[in-house]
Image (tube, grey):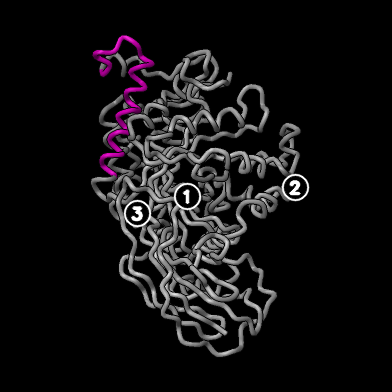
Amino acid sequence: MILRRVLSLTTAALLGGALAAGPLTTPATARTTTSCPAPATANRQLRGVWIASVTNIDWPSAPGLSVARQQAEYVRLLDNAVARHLNAVFVQVRPTADAFWPSPYEPWSQYLTGTQGKNPGYDPLAFLVREAHARGLEFHAWMNPYRVSMKADPSSLSPNHPARRHPDWTHPYAGKLYYDPGIPDVRHFVERAMLDAVRRYDIDGVHFDDYFYPYPSGTADFPDDATFAKYGSGFTDKAAWRRHNIDLLIQEMDRRIHALKPWVKFGVSPFGIWRNKSSDPAGSDTNGLESYTAISADTRGWVKKRWIDYLAPQIYWYIGFTVADYAKLVPWWARQVDGTGVQLYIGQADYRQGAAGQAAPWQDPAELSRHLAFNRAYPQVAGDIHFSAKDMDADRLGAVSRMVADHYARPALVPLMPRLGGHAPHRPRPTVEGSVVAWRPVRGAVRYAVYRFDGPATGCGLDEAHRIAVTGGTSFTDGTAEPGGAYVYVVTALDRLWHESAGTPTRRR
């Protein structure tokens, strides 16, 4: 039923509901014979949003909702993303060693039904991917490798949970339960559990956030002395051994993901500071918590060794913040990825903008927009991911609307990732009937871009200024066309890695 609604929702979703103009009423003319060359690739930008499921932050809004309510909520989030001209969603589908799909390794997530292990009555991950792709959005499966539960008591887990079958794999720490990353069997298990989703679903990426070893809590250390004694041979420094364990996870996941599906992207969104300059001359001019020491994540090392396809550091601080200045961290991360082929996206703190208790800069509705304007000076920055969906929708102070108006006025294509291959499909042959542009499916295409020219498409110029939609369907209704207007439309085909075909102009008088 939801899929049948997609075409009816397309116009409002892709154009933000700006449907004041009536449909075109004059008959379509024959298509022109001119071919538009494939456009240049510089005009691209990832625009993503995190959709968090842990503790029902974003979706579902509460556990135990009906299937129809869950699906409707998700569709609304996607339609809002498309209305803002975003092009990627990062959806948390393994929040606490559980699953949003029928996994042979782990129980159903409690955040779906309220009871861990209870079947929600449908396959959420299949639905999540299908609906995102129907709207032309890239879908990244966001997973947390080692967090088992938001409670420390193992008895809160479902009876068949792997952590209950292997209690020696886990440690309670700071009120939560974690797998021990230093146990090889644990690492191998969580990899298999996560790779099951890669193998069985048409996802576009696997995404980790900043939870590896848990963040320190007070003076208590993560209780893995016995694990170090058993598995730490060759290491005199437990901190170095912990980083080695996380290095193995990243390196192995990179290799195994691409062995299964070479086109699936692998990325990490780490804490925004790798190391401070005071700790390491290669570090940033900051004075905050370091992911290198606090959570054993050598994020800079993963970039230099090219073990990830993209990095999205959570630079959740305002411009001018003394401890961790956005204006110092973006250039630092830009230098780290330069020449590596690893793409850099910036994690944006939409949740801080206009929120009670946040510092004065976050009470200025222009702060988020300033961040994106600042990024333009650094060509290594290939886009942004916003945390999170509910905060974008809240649009406190109108800051998100301002950012969208300033920077996301037209749909954008995701940057190419040459390291993963791919090639442009053949060009579509569109027809125009009234206000509907339609085309036949093109082999190898998973989405299409629609361009409109208000007059002759001289030289075509397939750029963002003329792009009016990106869709996973094979038709588009132009709800913003003026009645009686003379337009030329061009449709291009995009493969799963966003390589774009040439296009054939189709004239509409």
Q: Which residues are magenta?
A: 231-257
* Residue type indicated by callout 3: Pro
Distance Cα–Cα, label 1 vs label 2: 26 Å
Distance Cα–Cα, label 3 vs label 1: 16 Å
Judged from this view, the residue extending furthest toward the top is 236
* Residue type indicated by callout 1: Val
* Residue type indicated by callout 2: Leu
Label 2 element class? helix
- Residue wearing tag 2: 397
The percent coordinates of residue 196 (x first, y second) are: 29, 48
> Mark 2 against mark 3, which lies toward the viewer?
2
> Mark 1 against mark 2, which lies toward the viewer?
2
Q: Specify the quadrant of the image occupied by residue 243.
A: top left
Circle on res. 102: 3
Q: Specify the quadrant of the image occupied by residue 146.
A: top left
The percent coordinates of residue 422 (x first, y second) are: 31, 55
Distance Cα–Cα, label 2 vs label 3: 41 Å
In the displayed structure, 302 sits above or below 238; it is below
Seen in the image, is 372 located left or right of residue 153? right
- The C terminus - image quarter: bottom right
Seen in the image, is 455 located left or right of residue 444? right
Q: Specify the quadrant of the image occupied by residue 267.
A: top left
Sequence-first disc among 1 and 2: 1
5 part of magenta stretch: no
Q: Residue at x 54, y 49 (%)?
A: 49
- Residue wearing tag 1: 91
